[in-house]
Image (tube, rainbow, N blue to C red):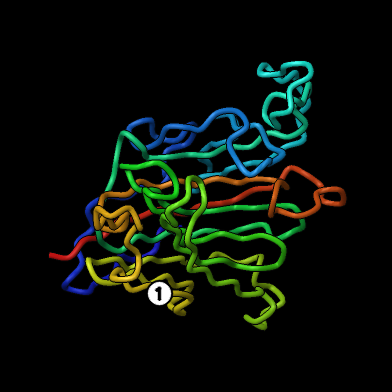
């Protein structure tokens, strides 16, 4: 299912995962988030929900009841107040293994666009606490919309400044859009970042406008970032899962990183 590499002379492939080896994802490329991660999401992340089959990375969300090992009776924290895990999924990350500053980041994948599902292909900066480290949402989907977002510091802890784009998938005017594979791309240099789907520009940001207001002229998009691939459920943004039959799959054909010669 691999696609021909771009022939543009200015780009050199510096890293990729084609997911051609059956079984577990390559441990030289990916580690995993574990447990309840963020956004009051419904899923418990575990490595077992990610596997390679038929040239694809498959991240699978499942109905899976098990005791929450972090449960604390009487807790008001959403991570520890739930006695039972109701859903599982996976989140793969390159943190500590691979990171890049500038380049073309591509992912060819197919996403399930039913209610309550929240797949994402995104990056975080290696230094700083969120959002001061910078977040780039190359592909994010929930509640009928594709998102292409940039987030950086606001001067308040855990509160981001956002430059976001939300595009209803109905605007593609293709009733079979969700059944097809699409290519998401980020082109990133020291001046701008642009996010595309199938060569259609979704959002762009001028990096002269993304400094954290910390008095140190710190720009989180002028540092290396690592990649995350995950399928979240419900939570603050994912929507209602009540009528969504699981399992659900986020299928990834490849992830490729190019840099200019």
Which residue is at 63% across, 44% downward?
39
Which residue is at 38% across, 30% downward?
27
Q: Position of residue 75 (x, y in %)?
A: 74, 22
* Of residues 220 and 212, the one drawn nearer to the viewer in this rendering: 212
Which residue is at 32% across, 68% downward?
187
Determine whether, in the image, residue 154 is placed left or right of residue 36. left
Q: Position of residue 227 (x, y in %)?
A: 40, 47
Q: Position of residue 30 (x, y in %)?
A: 40, 36
Crowding at dot 1, Cα within 10 Å, few <14 / some 14-19 / many 20+, comes out as many
Determine whether, in the image, residue 129 is placed left or right of residue 121. left
Q: Secondary structure at mark 1?
A: strand
* Of residues 145 and 80, the one drawn nearer to the viewer in this rendering: 80
Q: Is residue 7 above or below residue 171?
A: above
* Of residues 259 and 130, the one drawn nearer to the viewer in this rendering: 130
Q: Residue 173 lies in what quarter of the image? A: bottom right
Q: Quadrant of the C terminus?
A: bottom left
* Numbered circles on residues, count: 1
Q: Is residue 63 above or below residue 182?
A: above
Q: Position of residue 54 (x, y in %)?
A: 52, 46
* Residue under pointer 1: 204
Which residue is at 40% across, 74% downward?
204
């Amino acid at each position: 299912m691999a696609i021909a590499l771009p022939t543009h002379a200015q780009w050199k492939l510096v890293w990729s995962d084609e997911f051609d080896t059956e079984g577990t994802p390559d441990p030289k490329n990916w580690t995993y988030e574990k447990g309840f991660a963020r956004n009051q999401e419904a899923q418990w992340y575990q490595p077992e929900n990610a596997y390679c089959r038929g040239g694809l990375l498959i991240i699978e969300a499942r109905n899976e009841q098990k005791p929450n090992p972090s449960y604390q009776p009487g807790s008001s924290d959403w991570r520890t107040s739930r006695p039972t895990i109701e859903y599982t999924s996976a989140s793969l990350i390159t943190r500590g293994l691979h990171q890049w500053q500038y380049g073309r980041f591509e992912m060819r994948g197919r996403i399930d666009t039913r209610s309550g599902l929240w797949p994402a292909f995104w990056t975080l900066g290696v230094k700083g606490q969120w959002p001061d480290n910078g977040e780039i949402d190359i592909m994010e989907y929930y509640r009928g919309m594709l998102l292409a977002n940039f987030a950086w510091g606001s001067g308040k802890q855990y509160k981001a400044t956002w430059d976001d784009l939300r595009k209803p998938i109905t605007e593609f005017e293709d009733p079979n859009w969700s059944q097809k594979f699409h290519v998401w791309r980020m082109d990133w240099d020291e001046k701008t970042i642009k996010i595309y789907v199938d060569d259609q520009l979704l959002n762009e940001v001028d990096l002269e406008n993304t400094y954290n207001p910390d008095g140190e002229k710190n720009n989180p998009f002028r540092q290396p970032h690592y990649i995350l691939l995950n399928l979240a459920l419900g939570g603050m943004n994912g929507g209602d899962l009540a009528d969504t039959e699981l399992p659900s799959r986020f299928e990834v054909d490849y992830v490729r990183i190019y840099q200019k010669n």
